[in-house]
Image: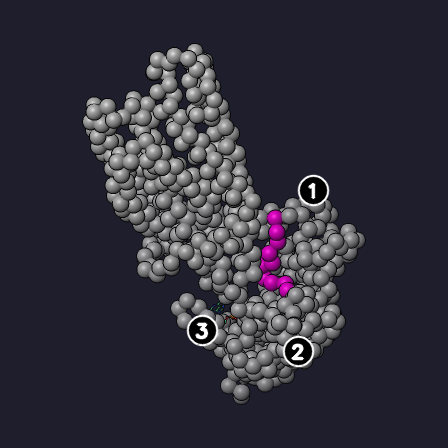
């Protein structure tokens, strides 16, 4: 296995505002109440923080001044001076309790909002994946979907819930504190504002760094999940070839590359705060110098000075948070951009606006001059070149021919896994593209060489896709598929779980479960893709008999490499290089002495399938 390549940095840029608008439209606007409540609570908590500090000035001045008689308290009412010692702390406690409640409420709402949104994104991504064209899924590693669903979606959550709410809160605190500072001393506040351009420069610089790091980390997370999945899928080959250490080295390279990006991202998040601290503390120094000078001239009270400094500290803290959060927002934007690219790909296999339904019942299939070209990242691969064939209800046609000739491709055009690129395929005279995908696929059963089973019970696997089939129907299907006896011999019978991809069953057992599934589906079109080729003789005989029962009355297209399994077909199509090279019954094709006869002769070397003397000489003599 190869180590996925390091990413090349794409220069493509997209303006931020359409992205933000879309995040609002598609996600945040669905949770408007929660979102605005969060913002309101954040603003309230921010306001209370500023109020607490604003309260410092009159409190200190009240407490540190000798009073005679009742004094006005916060301009609201008059109190006896000896009560001030109780009243001032009581107001501070009351304000801080309200502030803490607001912050706790905000955190609880943000958590629900954030995880709600990440869930929405994950559901959408999965839905896109499961509806995507097979061609796209084949051309993209499944690991990239996994990393998008698990990693990118969380970056967006962090940015657009916690990020936005905390950002707004800190921005509000900053503005509130600056206004409060302005009331205390305008000149000092102007000095503070001088630091703003420097801080925004820092934000931009670190934002750019973290965007770049996030992009790299996302690509490497994708590479890592692809590498992990590939190693698990290919574990037998890896062990057989003693490649464990080599694969550990390959995956370690990806992990190291990912780590470098993740560390760079974490660094820019961590360094943005301290960098803005330098500016903040320089301002504090300037303010202290100026305030000390003002105080020495008697222009500033102790209370004003203390409150101003406390506010300045809070402003510095908010500024630090803002620079930190700006990097979180940058990462979220980068992730959102990637997610939207994935969400925006529309499947090419689509239905007409008003598709027709293919009703359940006998189906005649016709291929009319069918051409097909695979689109791959490395260019088009012409595969079928003018295929004509037909199959009527109750008929079995067999596709045989050299490897790579196009047999499997012919089968995958029927359920519209791919669409023809020329000519047409009809079912009862209707072009497949005019039919609803649901009704078309409902009329087709597919049994492949390696049938896929879900990690569920045997009963659930047989019933997959059917709505509430009765237990009797499942057992009847299993009996018809010669599977009932082995199922009953399993520890939990029909309730036995089959393991990942049916790993706890033998190839022949999996095959018979798949045939039982097809029996239960009872579809008029049956596609068999080398359904018996992986089996030993005993299993093959059982499966073959089951298949023959299944084929009865249906329009069957069968691919077989072993010509012994196609002898009874009504017609055999020999597919070579994307064309129908020959067509006829077994006897007629053998008598013709062409490609089929040659294939039959070759196979008779492994075991006399056909009487050798029945075959004409290759030279035609
Ligand atoms: N998903 C794909 N993308 C690109 N090319 C493909 C794809 N699937 C098959 N092909 C190419 O199309 C050609 C026909 O493949 P197909 O699997 O239909 O042949 P086949 O006759 O079924 O072969 P075999 O008997 O070996 O299974 C081959 O050249 C193959 O490389």
Residue located 60% across and 58% down the image: 451
Q: Distance between the residues labelled 2 and 1?
A: 48 Å
**Circle 3 sits in a helix, a strand or a loop, which is it?**
strand
The segment highlighted magenta reads 446-455
Q: Distance between the residues labelled 2 and 3?
A: 27 Å
Q: Residues within 10 Å of mark 2 (few under 14, many from 20)?
A: some
Q: Main SS of the magenta segment?
A: loop
Mark nearer the N terminus (2 vs 1):
2
Q: Distance between the residues labelled 3 and 1?
A: 48 Å
The answer to which quarter of the image holds residue 389 is: bottom right
Name the residue tied to disc 3: 381
- Residue 157: percent from left, percent from top: 47, 45
Tell which residue pokes out farthest to the bottom in this image. 621
Name the residue tied to disc 1: 491
Q: How crowded is mark 1: few (under 14 residues within 10 Å), some or many (20 or more)?
A: few
Residue located 42% across and 30% down the image: 51
> Could you tell whether 473 is left or right of 442 in the image?
right
> Could you tell whether 158 is left or right of 369 in the image?
left
Q: Is mark 3 within 8 Å of ligand 1?
A: yes
- Residue 99: percent from left, percent from top: 47, 29
Name the residue tied to disc 2: 430
């Amino acid at each position: 296995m190869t180590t996925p390549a390091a990413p090349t940095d794409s220069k493509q840029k997209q303006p931020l505002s359409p992205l933000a608008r879309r995040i609002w439209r598609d996600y945040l606007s669905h949770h408007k109440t929660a979102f605005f409540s969060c913002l309101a609570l954040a603003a309230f908590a921010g306001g209370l923080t500023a109020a607490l500090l604003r309260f410092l000035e009159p409190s200190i001045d009240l407490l540190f001044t000798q009073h005679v008689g009742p004094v006005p308290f916060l301009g609201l009412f008059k109190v006896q001076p000896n009560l001030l010692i109780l009243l001032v702390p009581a107001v501070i406690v009351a304000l801080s309790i309200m502030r803490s409640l607001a912050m706790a409420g905000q955190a609880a709402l943000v958590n629900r909002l954030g995880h709600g949104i990440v869930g929405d994104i994950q559901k959408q991504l999965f839905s896109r994946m499961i509806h995507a064209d097979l061609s796209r899924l084949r051309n993209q590693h499944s690991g990239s979907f996994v990393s998008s669903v698990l990693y990118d979606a969380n970056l967006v959550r962090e940015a657009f819930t916690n990020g936005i709410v905390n950002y707004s809160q800190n921005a509000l605190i900053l503005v509130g504190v600056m206004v409060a500072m302005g009331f205390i001393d305008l000149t000092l506040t102007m000095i503070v504002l001088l630091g703003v351009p420097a801080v925004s420069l820092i934000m931009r610089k670190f934002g750019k760094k973290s965007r770049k790091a996030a992009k790299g980390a996302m690509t490497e997370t994708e590479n890592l999940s692809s590498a992990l999945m590939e190693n698990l899928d290919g574990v037998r080959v890896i062990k057989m070839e003693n490649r464990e250490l080599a694969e550990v080295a390959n995956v370690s390279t990806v992990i190291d590359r990912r780590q470098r990006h993740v560390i760079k991202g974490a660094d820019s998040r961590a360094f943005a705060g301290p960098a803005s601290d330098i500016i903040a503390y320089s301002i504090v120094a300037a303010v202290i110098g100026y305030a000390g000078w003002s105080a020495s001239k008697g222009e500033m009270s102790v209370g004003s000075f203390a409150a101003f400094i406390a506010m300045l500290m809070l402003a510095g803290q908010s500024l630090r948070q803002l620079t930190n959060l700006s990097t979180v927002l940058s990462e979220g934007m980068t992730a959102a951009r990637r997610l939207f690219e994935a969400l925006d790909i529309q499947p090419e296999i689509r239905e007409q606006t008003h598709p027709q339904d293919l009703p359940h019942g006998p189906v005649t299939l016709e291929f009319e001059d069918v051409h097909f070209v695979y689109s791959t990242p490395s260019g088009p691969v012409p595969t079928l070149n003018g295929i004509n064939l037909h199959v009527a209800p109750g008929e079995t046609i067999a596709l045989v021919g050299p490897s790579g000739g196009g047999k499997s491709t012919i089968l995958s055009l029927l359920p519209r896994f791919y669409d023809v690129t020329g000519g047409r395929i009809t079912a009862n005279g209707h072009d497949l593209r005019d039919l609803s995908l649901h009704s078309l696929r409902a009329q087709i059963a597919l049994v492949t060489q390696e049938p896929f089973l879900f990690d569920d019970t045997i009963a659930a696997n047989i019933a997959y896709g059917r709505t509430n089939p009765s237990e009797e129907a499942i057992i009847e299907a299993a009996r018809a598929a010669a599977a009932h006896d082995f199922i009953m011999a399993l520890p939990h019978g029909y309730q036995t779980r089959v393991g990942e991809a049916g790993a706890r069953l033998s190839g022949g057992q999996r095959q018979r479960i798949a045939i039982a599934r097809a029996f239960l589906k009872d579809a008029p079109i049956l596609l068999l893709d080398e359904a018996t080729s992986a089996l030993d003789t005993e299993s093959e005989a059982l499966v073959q008999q089951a298949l023959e029962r299944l084929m009865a009355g249906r329009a069957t297209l069968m691919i077989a490499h072993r010509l012994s399994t196609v002898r009874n077909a009504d017609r055999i199509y020999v597919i070579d290089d994307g064309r129908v090279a020959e067509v006829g019954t077994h006897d007629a094709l053998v008598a013709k002495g062409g490609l089929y006869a040659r294939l039959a002769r070759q196979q008779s070397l492994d075991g006399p399938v056909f009487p050798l003397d029945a075959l004409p000489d290759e030279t035609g003599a």
